[in-house]
Image (spheres, rainbow, N blue to C red):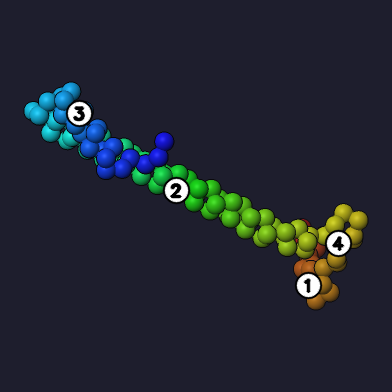
Amino acid sequence: MGPVGMPELVIILVIALIIFGPRKLPELGKSLGRSLNEFKRASHDLQNSLEQEIKLEEQKEAREKAAQTTEAPKAAEAPKADEPAEAAPADTAVPETVSRGADSRG
């Protein structure tokens, strides 16, 4: 079954004219045109919504991949359990507390 050519279209129109009559044929044509237009619009809307969903999924996957790549260097910087933690630098001063002991009593 191939595409509908001009001879087939003429035969279909003649049969429709015989079945529906000349008064109903314009109404039938209008309703058929509206139905085809609505079908095209619905299929276009469906295609757009599918494309949007695909884009959202791709963006979500890209964000997850970016989050994983930023977490990987942080994990590499953290000390491992079998390695000793580095001591605090020597130039950091620890404040000494002054004890007043017996002198503060009075």
| Foreground label between 4 and 3 | 3
Q: Position of residue 96 (x, y in %)?
A: 79, 67
Q: Are marks 4 and 3 in contact (CB under 8 Å)?
A: no
Q: Mark 1 = which residue?
A: 93
Residue 26, picture quadrant: top left
Q: Quadrant of the N terminus?
A: top left
| Foreground label between 4 and 1 | 4
From the viewer's perspective, tell me whether residue 18 is left or right of residue 36.
Answer: left
Label 4: element kind:
loop
Q: Quadrant of the C terminus?
A: bottom right
**Could you give the CA–CA distance between mark 3 and mark 2, rounded to whole angstroms?**
42 Å
| In the depicted structure, whether residue 93 falls above or below residue 32 | below
Q: Are marks 4 and 2 in contact (CB under 8 Å)?
A: no
| In the depicted structure, whether residue 30 falls above or below residue 75 | above
Q: Amino acid at mark 3?
A: Ala
| Foreground label between 3 and 2 | 3
The crowd level at tag 3 (other Cα within 10 Å; few <14, some 14-19, many 20+) is: some
Q: Mark 4 = which residue?
A: 85
> Is residue 66 visible to us here?
yes
Nearest the eye: 1 or 53: 1
Q: Amino acid at mark 1?
A: Ala
Q: Are marks 4 and 1 in contact (CB under 8 Å)?
A: no
**Which residue lies at the image location 18% right of the left edge and 23% below the top edge?**
19
Label 3: element kind:
helix
Label 2: element kind:
helix
Q: Which of the two labelled residues, at mark 2 and mark 1, occupies the earlier sequence position? A: 2
| In the depicted structure, whether residue 24 falls above or below residue 43 | above
Q: Position of residue 70 (x, y in %)?
A: 66, 60
**Could you give the CA–CA distance between mark 4 and mark 1, rounded to whole angstroms?**
19 Å
